[in-house]
Image (cartoon, grey):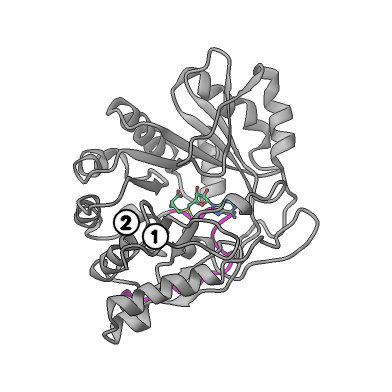
Amino acid sequence: MADLKLIDPCNRHLNYLRISITDRCNLKCIYCVPRDQIARLAHDEILTYEEILRFVRVGLTLGISKIRITGGEPLVRKGVYGFLTELSRMAGISDLSLTTNAVVLKDSLEKIRSAGIKRLNISLDTLKREKFKKIAGMDFFDQVWQGIQGAREMGFHPIKLNIVALNGVNDDELIDMAQLSFDYPFHIRFIEYMPIGESQMGNGPLLLAPEIKKRISVLGNLIPVRNSASDGPAQRYRFEGALGEIGFIHALSHHFCDRCNRLRLTARGQLRPCLLSDRHEDVKGPLRSGCSDKELAEIFFKAVRHKPSDHNLSVQGPSRVCGQMHSIGG
Ligand code: SAM
């Protein structure tokens, strides 16, 4: 198995696994969570940590080397720090990171660092307390901001701040958000809203990366930063004199599928070759019916064989993905 690699029919080398460890979240962001309450997965419907670790172990033999833990909100799942510790001890992971909304981050920083996490992506869609409550459904702005500052003070780097850009919601704050890259060494990443699942934002209206770029360029020239091989799809820039960076994740206005190196393991135990396609392979069933590692490897290969060459979300169409972002993990 050691020589086999996860290379898809488009010759993309898939070495990045994103793992959603829970569909539960302590926020209800309008762009992520459905308007109508949907039933949360029962405890036995989500993969156990042991099951995830076994699947990862097999993935590592196939060339997976980069792992991101996400959710729902990963820090609300019981036992997460022990799980992260076990993961970070596995040989073969060159990059282990975590995506969080930072609501409980401040009090978790020490445990996260001890567990071996060095890189954090944090969602932050507004700098205004009132608006935070409107977007996220909860009044947690202060906790989130303290968590972000605490992480910076503890030396987590880079700290990527993810902003889902929403017309009529936070478009008045694009410049203030970009300004943060002058004041702090943060990587500010503007993400185009993707109409996935039954989010409360529906199909838009969309605020796309070229428009965001135009609006924030009142702050100065955006100087391109060269992507390194392990970088994600963000188009990276830096304002002259800034401590941090600006990035754009333009899933709609400029597809980056030709460079996609990702697979996603959902909380309910499905392996998705593409965030924006509902096709998936069942992992939980085989894991629970005593399958061999060879059979688990075959699930990886099957997902890889069926990775779409391109996704079909576009700025024009109402095309939708049924899977919910909070359970796939973003
Ligand atoms: N709870 C964590 C958090 O809030 O960062 C992790 C899960 S969240 C689903 C992961 C990422 O997906 C976040 O950065 C979030 O902003 C992004 N996201 C969620 N729904 C989205 C959407 N409809 N379009 C674009 N990004 C979205």
Q: Is the residue marked 1 within 8 Å of ligand 1, measured from its CB?
A: no
* Residue corresponding to mark 2: 76
Prevailing secondary structure of the magenta residues: loop
Q: Residues within 10 Å of mark 1 (few under 14, many from 20)?
A: many
Q: How far apart, in angstroms, are the residues tagged by discs 2 and 1? A: 15 Å
For the residues carrying marks 2 and 1, which lies nearer the camera in this image?
1
Q: Is residue 45 visible?
A: no
Judge by depth and name the residue closer to the eye, 135 or 192: 192
| Residue type beneath disc 1 | Ile
Q: Is residue 109 above or below residue 136?
A: above
For label 1, the SS is strand
Can you identify the residue that label 1 sits on? 19
Could you say where residue 326 lies in the image, as x and y percent from the top left? 48, 61
Q: Which residues are magenta?
A: 27-43
Residue type at numbered disc 2: Val
- Apparent side of residue 151 relative to residue 31 in the rendered image (left or right): left
Give the residue at x 38% y 33%. Answer: 148
